[in-house]
Amino acid sequence: MRAMRLTAWGQGPVLTEVERPAPHGVEVLVRVEAVGLCHSDLHVVDSTPGALPYRLPFTLGHEVAGHVAELGPDAGGLAPGDRVVIYGPWGCGECSRCAAGRDNYCDRRGGLDRHGVGLGQDGGMAEYVLVPSARHLVPIGDLPAEQAAPLSDAGLTSYHAIAGLRHTLGDPASTAVVIGVGGLGHLAVQILRATTPGRVLAVDIREDALDLAHRSGAHFTTPVRDDTAHVLRTRTGGVGVDAVLDFVGNGATLDLAAALLRPGGELALVGSGGGRLTVCKPGALPPGARLSLPFWGTRPELAEVVALARSGALHVETEQFPLSEAPEAFARLRRGEVRGRVVLVPE
Ligand code: NAD
Ligand code: ZN
Ligand code: ZN
């Protein structure tokens, strides 16, 4: 079968032929119907040797939807043909976090040489993907695969980050700012609108991303300029915002986030842009500020995101490519030309 594989650090992934895997024990073989391309895939591809604990080669793709093709002899709970999305962060499977479906915060993560599907072990940019256990599969019913796949990271990560902010966004007068309205950010805007009562403001460097923010339900959007912090604070009557979700995470966006927060406000840093924020008292952050570093999400939350999408509250903006055009899709994402999420569809 064809697969998009990372074969050497610092070089682009390549489309190659690999053998179709067979499920053993409790493993489940999933026929891939759609797989999302995440900005994190670029971070992985661009990593220097030794920066990540992964062994090469492996197949990329950590946002995967499809149907059960074959069950290992000891696998249960699902039947061939069942349509599923893959819960991607695979932990040790034994610690208390993993037992609760919180593999994203596995206690043994630091000692693992893989972090989940398509992250150090073969992922979904292929015709089939082997899943270690049915516990990583969430049913999607009749949800289209290109809608379901991005829910497993872009949707889930946004949902998990917002869940951590919910205590500060319960008031209709509260304000949240989304920085970076790409694959994750446009779903964050929709999830905020669907699950919190307050106002949603969005910022991006691209006009078409701001259009997408509007269509996703943002009350106000503005491009990044020198006076962006002032423009946004004005929208809050000058007091500052209750929560900032930073889906970029470079030095400029972290500075913007710090300048926007009101006292007691909260910053969720999601983007892996490598920027730094100095934390000290007194400092750039206002008194009472809180900072979170959410990573992916939990399995129960993935089921909630799928339910939200099936209720009609979420719509993923997608650009679809056949798997054979994965190299061009990677290039488009790198050039910042993607609107919403790129989804690859195996032929
Ligand atoms: P994306 O490329 O689809 O979207 C990024 C958006 O940010 C684009 O619209 C881009 O125009 C905008 N942007 C870039 N620079 C900006 C700036 N200086 N100010 C404002 N907007 C700017 O990326 P994505 O797939 O949505 O991923 C976003 C980030 O989140 C990446 O860094 C990715 O690695 C990270 N990520 C983190 C997790 C996690 O669990 N913490 C999970 C998935 C992705
Ligand atoms: Zn991702
Ligand atoms: Zn664990």
Image: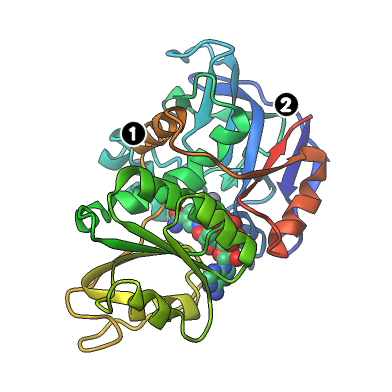
Instruction: Name the residue rendered at 65%, 28% in the picture.
Output: 32
Q: Is residue 64 visible?
A: yes
Instruction: Name the residue rendered at 52%, 47% in the picture.
Output: 114
3D distance between C-alphas at marks 1 and 2: 30 Å
Say left or right for 312 vs 334. Answer: left
| Residue picked out by circle 2 | 20
Tell me the tag on residue 332: none
Say left or right for 255 vs 144. Answer: left
Q: Nearer the viewer, residue 132 or 313?
A: 313
Residues under numbered marks 1 and 2 in contact, where contact means CB atoms less than 8 Å apart: no
Q: Amino acid at mark 1?
A: Pro
Q: Amino acid at mark 2?
A: Arg
Front label number (1 vs 2): 1
Q: Give coordinates of residue 151: x percent, y percent.
A: 50, 39
- Residue 207 image-quadrant placement: bottom right
Instruction: Name the residue rendered at 45%, 40% in the picture.
Output: 90
Instruction: Check the picture and name the quadrant holding the C terminus.
Output: top right
Instruction: Name the residue rendered at 35%, 81% in the picture.
Output: 259
Instruction: Check the picture and name the quadrant holding the N terminus.
Output: top right
Q: Is residue 212 above or below residue 243?
A: above
| Residue picked out by circle 1 | 300
Q: Give coordinates of residue 311: x percent, y percent.
A: 42, 28
Q: Is residue 280 above or below residue 98?
A: below
